[in-house]
């Protein structure tokens, strides 16, 4: 990534309200590097779906998947942390409590993350479990929580240090609604992660409480983080009165939590759980699209009623885009299979994969790219915005990735519908087996892989925007 | 939003609403864990089942398979494999599983490959006990058919 140098006659710090915001930069850069890795392994998996023995000996599917999903989680966490280090001082109107701690934690987290990924890739998973002493405190081998126990402890330590730093900054400064919502979301993230240490011998209980991390993160507290970041960006790029933005923010996160907490029930349909969850989960998760719909109205309203024309058009595009794609991916595609009678047939099919891809991209990848788009020109000392040329390249990246993700989702949905038709709807004896069904879905998987390649091209295009402004800067 | 709907009203709905539903959720979860024993049949939770779960975890089986619909979607559902491949009989299932695990990877060109995990026979038997336990949990009638 380019542009570390100060520009001629102009110090980087001039473009930042508070110098300590600069600590966000390594977080954002490392997040984007991991993003590339995530997509690379996504392409490997996508190919393994149709060429089953591709890299089978070196990178078995389970390893590629673990790397793909864990890189996603970790780079989003880097993105959230970078976002917090950037926006909390500006909101609190004070320097970060300890920039040094933020940098130390960056290296600790980056080292722990890199070692964990290398562990996945270089030794068999059971060996990794053995050398990290999993037998003494077993937490490994559960979806998304595959990290060795010692890595999980490291994540907790990094989160505590991070929360301390952010919390002290807020305590010292202005306690805006955005800061309070953001820190609530971040504390919730840390608290619910603690459930990853609970791994009972009874698989039924294990599965129940596993969702306390997974669901209450992505359909709970992460939405607070997303809402806070989006609100910050909208205030900055539209100049709309803070009071109005904050009121919307409260309404959106209220809807998110009121629907999302009991919405957890949509994961309790097919566990060793009472049947009432089928009603509770269906009703409340059917409401989960509402906060995302409100977010679309809000983002477009604020931009339409803007009081200023911010020169960073790319950041505006990301902010609008994330609201729309989160609504489609998390809202619409979630609703498609969230009612218990439908979910009975779709549970654990490619429909779930389709929803997962668009929801994560729309809500969380895009919100992190929104704040990066807004913050990077300032962190690099360029000014309020990148040059027109760089923004055009960035917007090409936006469209390529977003359109590719729409097609990935549509192809996986097609695969999922056919899978349900062949494997789930017929009676035992008439239904095709899982593996026979997969063969029938090959055309969709090839199309998905092709869309995945376009996504990678989009990502590289997006990254190229950082090279454009190596020398020139736009006056704001 | 109209002027009569103020920010403090929105804030109160947020705090009040989320606290209320969080408490309700915890209450329902407590009730759920209280009635779960009659559905998960934890009286069948032997040491072999427990060892089997450990093996399931350290070999990252969930990285390809699903277990009661959760996991990766790359390889067959195993929550009911005890019925599909063992016809609900433990000895049959153990024999099947030992045979199946020992011939991996199948090495059929282009076919998805299951790695060779080099498990011993007692270990595979523990895994079979774990999958039997999973199959015997009552999960509200899922999956729709034997194929999972």
Image (spheres, coloured by chain):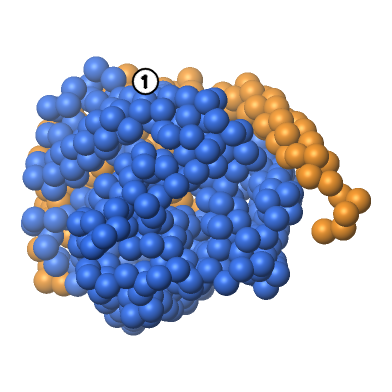
Chain colours: A blue, B orange
- Residue A35: x and y in percent read 29, 58
**Mark 1 closeness class: few <14, some 14–19, many ≥20 residues within 10 Å:** some
Q: Is residue A209 above or below residue A393?
A: above
Q: Return the residue nearer the eye: A455 or A410.
A: A455
Quarter of the image for the C terminus of chain A: give it. bottom left
**Residue A75 seen by the camera:** no
- Residue A63: x and y in percent read 21, 50
Q: Return the residue nearer the eye: A398 or B126.
A: A398
The residue under the point 66% across, 46% down is A253
Chain hosting mark 1: B
Q: Quadrant of residue A176?
A: top right
- Residue A321: x and y in percent read 52, 69
- Residue A352: x and y in percent read 48, 60
The residue under the point 46% across, 51% down is B69
**Residue A228 seen by the camera:** yes
Q: Return the residue nearer the eye: B114 or A145.
A: A145
**For the residue labelled by badge 1, is the local secondary structure a helix, a strand or a loop?**
loop
Q: Is residue A469 above or below residue A178?
A: below
Q: Is residue A18 toward the left or the right of residue A209 in the image?
A: left
Quarter of the image for the N terminus of chain A: give it. bottom left
Mark 1 highlights which residue? B46
The residue under the point 14% across, 66% down is A53
Q: Quadrant of residue B73?
A: bottom left
Q: Is residue A162 toward the left or the right of residue A337 in the image?
A: left
Q: Return the residue nearer the eye: B4 or B135.
A: B4
Q: Quadrant of residue B89?
A: top left
Pick out the residue farthest to the front: A9
């Amino acid at each position: 990534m380019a542009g570390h140098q100060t520009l001629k006659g102009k110090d980087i710090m001039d473009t930042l309200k508070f110098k300590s915001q600069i600590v966000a930069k390594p977080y954002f850069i490392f997040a984007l590097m991991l993003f590339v890795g995530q997509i690379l392994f996504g392409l490997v998996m996508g190919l393994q779906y149709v060429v089953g023995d591709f890299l089978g000996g070196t990178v078995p599917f389970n390893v590629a998947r673990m790397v793909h999903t864990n890189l996603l989680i970790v780079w989003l966490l880097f993105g959230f942390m970078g976002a917090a280090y950037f926006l909390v001082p500006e909101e609190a109107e004070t320097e970060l409590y300890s920039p040094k701690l933020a940098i130390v934690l960056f290296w600790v987290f980056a080292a722990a993350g890199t070692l964990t990924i290398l562990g996945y890739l270089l030794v068999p998973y059971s060996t990794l479990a053995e050398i990290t002493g999993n037998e003494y405190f077993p937490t490994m081998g559960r979806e998304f929580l595959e990290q060795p126990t010692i890595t999980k402890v490291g994540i907790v330590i990094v989160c505590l240090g991070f929360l301390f730093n952010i919390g002290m900054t807020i305590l010292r400064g202005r306690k805006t609604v955005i800061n309070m919502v953001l820190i609530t979301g971040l504390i919730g993230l840390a608290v619910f992660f603690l459930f990853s240490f609970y791994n009972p011998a009874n698989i039924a209980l294990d599965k129940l409480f596993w969702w306390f991390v997974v669901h209450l993160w992505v359909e709970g507290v992460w939405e607070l983080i997303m809402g806070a970041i989006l609100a910050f960006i909208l205030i900055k790029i539209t100049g709309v009165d803070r009071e109005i933005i904050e009121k919307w923010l409260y309404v959106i996160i209220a809807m998110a939590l009121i629907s999302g907490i009991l919405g957890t029930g949509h994961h309790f349909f097919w566990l060793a759980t009472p049947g009432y969850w089928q009603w509770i989960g269906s009703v409340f998760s059917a409401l989960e699209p509402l906060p995302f719909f409100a977010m679309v109205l809000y983002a477009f309203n604020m931009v339409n009623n803007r009081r200023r024309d911010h020169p960073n058009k790319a950041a505006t595009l990301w902010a609008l885009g994330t609201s729309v794609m989160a609504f489609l991916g998390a809202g619409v595609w979630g609703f498609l299979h969230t009612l218990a009678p439908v979910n009975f047939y779709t549970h654990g099919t490619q429909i779930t994969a389709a929803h997962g891809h668009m929801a994560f991209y729309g809500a969380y990848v895009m919100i992190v790219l929104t704040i990066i788009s807004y913050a990077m020109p300032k962190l690099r000392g360029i000014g309020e915005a990148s040059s027109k040329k760089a923004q055009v390249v960035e917007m090409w990246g936006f469209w390529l990735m977003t359109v590719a993700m729409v097609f990935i989702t549509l192809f996986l949905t097609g695969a999922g519908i056919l899978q349900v038709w062949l494997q789930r709807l017929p009676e035992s004896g008439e239904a095709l087996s899982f593996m026979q069904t997969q063969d029938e879905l090959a055309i969709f998987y090839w199309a998905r892989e092709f869309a995945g390649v376009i996504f990678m091209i989009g990502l590289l295009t997006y990254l190229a925007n950082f090279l454009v402004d190596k020398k020139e800067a736009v006056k704001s | 939003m109209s002027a009569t709907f103020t920010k403090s009203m929105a804030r109160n709905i947020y705090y009040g609403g989320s606290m209320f539903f969080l408490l309700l959720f915890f209450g329902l979860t407590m009730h759920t864990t209280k009635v779960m024993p009659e559905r998960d049949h934890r009286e069948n939770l032997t040491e072999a089942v427990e060892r089997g779960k450990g093996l399931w975890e350290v070999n990252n089986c969930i990285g390809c398979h699903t277990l009661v619909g959760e996991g990766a979607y790359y390889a067959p559902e195993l929550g009911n494999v005890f019925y599909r491949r063992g016809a609900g009989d433990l000895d049959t299932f153990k024999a099947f599983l030992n045979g199946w695990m020992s011939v991996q990877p199948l090495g059929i060109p282009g076919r998805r490959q299951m790695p060779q995990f080099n498990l011993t026979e007692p270990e595979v038997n523990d895994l079979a006990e774990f999958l039997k336990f999973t199959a015997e949990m009552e999960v509200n009638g899922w999956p729709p058919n034997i194929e999972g």
